[in-house]
Amino acid sequence: MLSDGTGDEQRQAFNLLKCEELKYTKNAEFLWRLAKSTKNMAAIEEKLGNEKVKESLIFDAYRHAAQALDLDKNNAEIHKWYAILAGARGEFLGITERVKSGNIFKKHIDHALELKPKDSTLHHLLGRFCFEVSQLSWLERRAATTLFGEVPSATYEEALLHFLAAEELRPSGWKENLLFIAKCHIQMNNYSAASNWLERASRVLVVTPEDEIVQKEVCELQQKYA
């Protein structure tokens, strides 16, 4: 698929979908694919250092995913991409909206897993949620609790279990998932294990623009924890 290929292939997929956008405004299958492709373009712009363009594309992608969800609430891919983009949008919002986005993310990932329990990406995303929640500072957690009541709790150990489940479901080599397994071990002070997982991540072929971003972080962490 072009949308899972190189940067040039992802750009080609995006341009093809944009050309058909007006024709398929009520087609949920089209809209979630457009949301995914727009998110891919945001990753390309991030690699180029164009943060404002990235932000605009993330909000566009979120809008497409929301439109798809309005049309079909029983599609695991739609819930997945709506969750991904709710989370991505949170990067550009304040703490209040970030917590709201996190709750939306968790709700839709859980629902998508009910529909598609052996989806490796969904297990990875649940790991990401646990990882991010584990990193909330005491002050952020207190503020969130004041605003919303009970805030979800999670540990790095829980996050690691989800990333390992994703790895088992997709053993062919997933650079980003391997990176997050390593990051969990770093947070748990298991530096030898982290180094081994970083080495595995570094050997996975770089294909997509997101892979390039991940590879940069892998190399930085290898220098720090070698």
Image (spheres, rainbow, N blue to C red):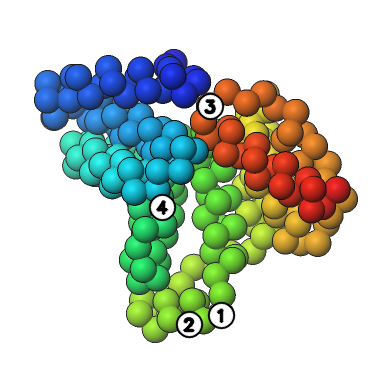
Crowding near pointer 2: few (<14 within 10 Å), some, many (20+)? some
Q: Pointer 3: what residue? A: 208
Q: Amino acid at mark 4?
A: Gly
Say which of marks 3 and 1 sits in front.
Answer: 3
Residue 136 position within the rendered picture, expressed as x and y whole percent measured from the top left: 55, 70
Q: Which mark is residue 46?
A: none
Q: Amino acid at mark 2?
A: Arg
Determine whether the residue tagged by mark 2 lies in a helix, strand or loop: helix
Q: Alpha carbon of mark 4 to alpha carbon of mark 1: how far? A: 21 Å
Q: How many marks overall? A: 4
Q: Residue at x 32, y 24 (%)?
A: 14
Q: Pointer 1: what residue? A: 138
* Marked residue nearer the N-terminal end (4 or 1): 4
- Residue 108 appearing in the image: no
Depth check: 101 or 16 in front?
A: 16
Q: Residue at x 58, y 32 (%)?
A: 211
Tell me, yes or no, whether the two marked residues, 2 and 1, touch with CB atoms within 8 Å.
yes
Q: Pointer 4: what residue? A: 87
Determine whether the residue tagged by mark 4 lies in a helix, strand or loop: helix
Residue 16 position within the rendered picture, expressed as x and y whole percent measured from the top left: 27, 17
